[in-house]
Amino acid sequence: MRVRRGKFLFLTIVCPLALAVACERPVSEERAGAPSDPPAAAEESSYRILVANPMSHVMFVSLQRADAMAEIGSVPAEGEQIFDIPAPPGATVTLIARDEGKTHSPTVTMMLPEDDTYATWTIE
């Protein structure tokens, strides 16, 4: 079966191009460059906690909230790390640090000072 050159060009170039143009969504000027899905708003204000790890191994830090625990990050050996946690000043939070083998799990429960948005904890 032989397809004429004009029909071939129409089917392979013109039709896909017309379809692409027809399906393109217009973008308003204020939406241009904006992310397609804005990030979810935080349910609470953020509080910063500096965690110091004097030990010779990495420690993994979790935040205990109600019945759920969420890992918030790690602190390098003999280092420090700042974590932003979703809690307002005056809230009581529990932080749990664990080593890789889960043999050492120091815990601290602290009330976040109301006159600041920054607290510190040294893992012991």
Image (tube, rainbow, N blue to C red):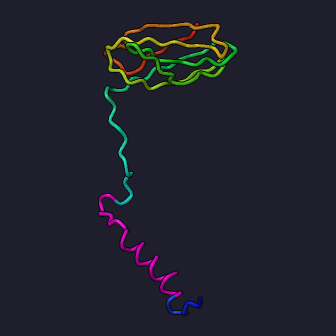
Which part of the image, by quadrant, shows the N terminus? Answer: bottom right
Most extreme residue toward the right, as rendered? Answer: 56
Residue found at x 59% / y 21%: 75
| Marker count (numbered) | 0
* Magenta segment includes 78: no
Residue found at x 60% / y 15%: 53
Which part of the image, by quadrant, shows the C terminus? Answer: top right
Q: Quadrant of residue 64?
A: top left
Residue 18 location (% of width, % of height):
41, 78
- Prevailing secondary structure class for the magenta stretch in the rendered image: helix
Q: Quadrant of residue 2?
A: bottom right
Residue 121 location (% of width, % of height):
50, 12
Residue 99 location (% of width, % of height):
63, 14
Residue found at x 32% / y 20%: 88
Magenta-tinted stretch: 8-31
Q: Quadrant of residue 57?
A: top right
Residue 43 location (% of width, % of height):
31, 28
Query: Is 93 placed left or right of 11 in the picture?
Result: left
Residue in the foreground of this view, choosing between 53 and 30: 30
* Magenta segment includes 27: yes
Most extreme residue toward the front, as rendered? Answer: 1
Residue in the foreground of this view, choosing between 115 and 112: 112
Q: Is residue 17 above or below residue 86?
A: below
